[in-house]
Image (cartoon, rainbow, N blue to C red):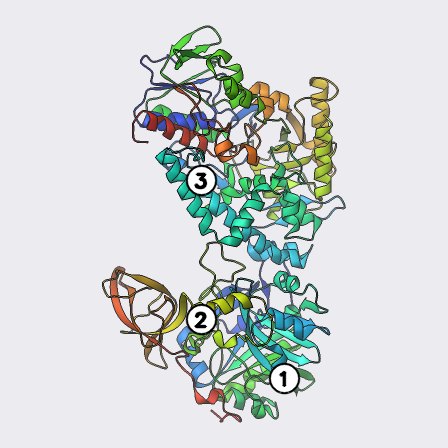
Amino acid sequence: MTDSPAPHYKQPLLKTPFHERARALSQIDSFIPWAGYTTVDVFTTMEQEYFAVRNATTLYDLTPMVKYRVSGPDAVPYLNRLVTRDVAKLKPDRVAYVVWCNDAGHLIDDGTIFRLGAGEYRICTAERQIDWLLDSAIGFDVQIGEVTEQIAALAVQGPTSCAMLKAAGLRGIELLKPFEIGYFSLGEHRLTLSRTGFTGDLGYEVWMDPAAAETIWDILMAAGRSRGIRAIGSQALNMARIEAGFIMPNVDFVSAEHTIRTGRDRSPLELGLGWLVDFNKGHFTGRRALLTEKKQGSRRQLVGLDIAGNKPAHNALIYTDDGGKREIGSVTSAMWSPTCKRNIALAIVDAPHFQVGSTVWAEIYLNRELVWERRMSRAQVVERPFFVPERRRATPPAEF
Amino acid sequence: MKTPAGLDAVIVGAGHNGLVAACYLARSGLKVLVLERQPYIGGAAVSRRLYEDFTYSNCSYVCSLLRPEIIRTLELPKYGLQVIPYEGGCTMMQGGGHLALYDNHDALRREISRHSKRDAEAYDRYSRDVMRQCKFIKPLLMHEPPDPTSFKPRDLMELLYLGKRFHNLGEKRMYDTLRFWTMSAADFLDEYFESEIVKAHFAGSSIIGTALGPRSPGTAYVLLHHYMGDIDDTVGAWGFARGGMGAISNALGASFEASGGTIRSGAPVAKILVRNGRASGVALADGEEIRAPLVISNLDVRRTFLETMDAKDLPEEFLGQVKNFKIRGSSGKLNIALDGLPQFPAIPPGSPCTRGDMHVTDTIEMMERAYDDWKDGRWSRAPYIDMLIPSQIDPTMVPAGKHYMSVFVQYCPYELADGPWDAAKRQAFGDTVINTIAQHSPNFKNLILHAEIRTPWDIENEVGLTEGNIFQGELTMDQLLFNRPVPGYAQYRSPVRGVYMCGSSTHPGGGVMGAPGANAARAVLRDLGRAP
């Protein structure tokens, strides 16, 4: 991994192995810190980058994603105690989206588990938590280590992503099924691909040796030239993920490891991730609390909202009525969806108003040439995701 | 400095709490006189020039706890108070390594990772838990502590408020709170960290000003007490007062005088006068008597009731409790004028961590050994020091190119096992500290132009703090909240009508916080039937 030449007290943020390539393409010098690295927020314009996700193919530098290697004879029982899903059911070369909780059934984080070999797993997650992972390992014969710096990663997402990868020389990529892991060679370089992503679209994540990073970037960029390839920053990705209904830590929930105020922790049931909780697999951390919550019902839930008008409901408070008398929640993520042509949002809403079909009201503030106006907009609780294209699952995927 | 006639209140001692109380009372329209023994005001929050053009923060040296509501209400910025943040901090290790603390979260994580990857991430959990406890305690700072044995509506309301807040913490955090208030800093830190240097660095604030070791129960709270300044989510919560700590006292003094108050310095109070069971004024050391129906003492509780009042005027049981109030001297202070910036080879070039608090105690064991020396009646042979060079940040303290170093020293006893303090012993104590620093800075000794060396005995004699205890009484659970200073008298009132306490001996305790002074003023005004 290319560390920044300056010491950490002069330059706290690391550079990813793709940094020089990103720097060259960055037109507006818009970089943001992410998990200790400096990464691109916007290359050119957020909208152009967003449409490349839905229209062509995109590269997004995923290297800062925190990665842990979990290995050893007790890897499965360990992971099964850690996360709420049944890891024993995860087949070799498959990926599972998982969440893990504390004893109170409150979410620590979400992430993905890769089954890479016998007793060999990788956890990918947004935030560092070796402290929690090691505490959870007491009594298990497992080794856990952070491998973030040893693996460079690119998300390749968009309708022409499969065609681009094929053109780049990844033979058989079209056979890779959703959540499947495949191993490919590109010249002398070995790549691991998973058909995963954060856009809700057709896409892959490419995992490689950091030393090969710039070469791979160049090959993919060249292969994608006729397929509209673009490097994208975090803002465009964020638009795509809201349409896909995915949640973000510190945006849609705060890890129970970080909350200071009481009542700010969230359970997977509250976040609409009940489908990830397997009560039949035996004990896991938070099981008892989640069972109780399941029996008694959740006090609040993260829902999708379809809001009248076209003004994004950023940070809006949610009410039962247009008079704003009874507050029942707040918006965590909001946007005008350019693809769906809907004004969508993710919001935490109190029981019983979170049922799909319920009508609630969002208090939206509009800045009209520095004059703020307040608008109460009718909103419908709707199913998420907001956008699920067929191509996301199709195997083999179409050319575009 | 005439004494005005028709005084409503006399404040004994122009420490920062006395001045805060004075400001609030004057602002509510009372005629207030502040009497100060020394020719300068400020008590332990002073800036003095003892050597050429060098300004020292002679006693207290950082500003973290001063309540923002006090700064705001008393308009201290208008009267010259500017708090400037300092950067990071570090502990230098015996073998030449170091641990630095950086403001930037990513720099800090990478720095702690050099010692333990796990600790780097455990640090977030540690900060979270400390913040959770601070969040619970913070609103109690500016409240009169409720008396749990009282049935007065006010006490019941306050207790209810306290109980509700406590209950709202949730089951798990209620347990945590009780453990936190009673456990040792060493045990507390063991629950988070594995690296000795990381634990030692954070343990420092659990022993500052405290006659306890890091393994003594109760020190986890002291650690929290020092953290309290950090919780406002505001910029500059921890910092230097520009111009030294005296800038706080001077701003308070100016604010007070602008409200019509009078300060008389060089006017030591010998006695608080009581007539018919009520305060009637004070007598100065030269025999002058000053009449006032209210006397508010900024002195510590021992000095107020055992030395400045007639025992006959006080209930016997109360006196006994005051005598038992723990107020032990355990800290010393060096103020050093330097001919240039000392080098610290352990610190990498360009690191800003020397612009914060620097330490040289790299294990908890070493800290505990330092405490053992204190118990044996001698100063620590390898003392814990909290060393800062404010002149790197504050341009007002010294001539250009020179530097001022403030060195707080833990532990140093008030009474030595081998007889009373004298000049030779004071110098030997100072040499111990200077040699300790010199072990980490080869050019340090050559830079020293002047050093003010203050033992607990000196601090008692100059500042008036009993035994030189910087908190006016230990911050242990038996002396906090409704037990501070004495059960039944935790609401700033004394057994004698018209006599109040406003020093750090009262809730919420020491540090340049101003909360005791503000709370005391509110109690006085409430008794007068005036709106605070």
Q: Relative to the observer, which residue lies in front, B531 or B390?
A: B531
User: What is the CA distance from the residue labelled 1 to the residue labelled 2?
Assistant: 34 Å
Name the spot of residue A233 as percent of width and height, x first.
48, 72
Chain letter belonging to callout 2 = A
Name the spot of residue A134 as percent of width and height, x first.
66, 63
Q: Are marks 3 and 1 in contact (CB under 8 Å)?
A: no
Q: Relative to the observer, which residue lies in front, A254 or B157?
A: B157
Res B265 → quadrant: top left
Mark 3 highlights which residue?
Answer: B140
The answer to whether any part of residue A211 appears in the image is no
Secondary element under disc 3, as helix, strand or loop, is helix
Name the spot of residue B221 as percent of width and height, x first.
57, 41
In the image, what residue type sits under mark 2? Gln
Q: Which mark is residue A235?
A: 2
Secondary element under disc 2, as helix, strand or loop, is helix
Residue at 75% x, 43% y is B94
| Quarter placement of the C terminus of chain B | top left
> Alpha-carbon neighbours of circle 1 within 10 Å: few (<14), some, or many (≥20)?
some
Between discs 1 and 2, the one toward the N terminus:
1
Left or right of residue A235: residue B307: right
Q: How many marks?
A: 3
Is there one chain holding both mark 3 and mark 2? no
Residue B380's place in the image compared with B177, above or below, is above
Mark 1 highlights which residue?
Answer: A91
Res B447 → quadrant: top right
Q: Relative to the observer, which residue lies in front, A327 or B175?
A: B175
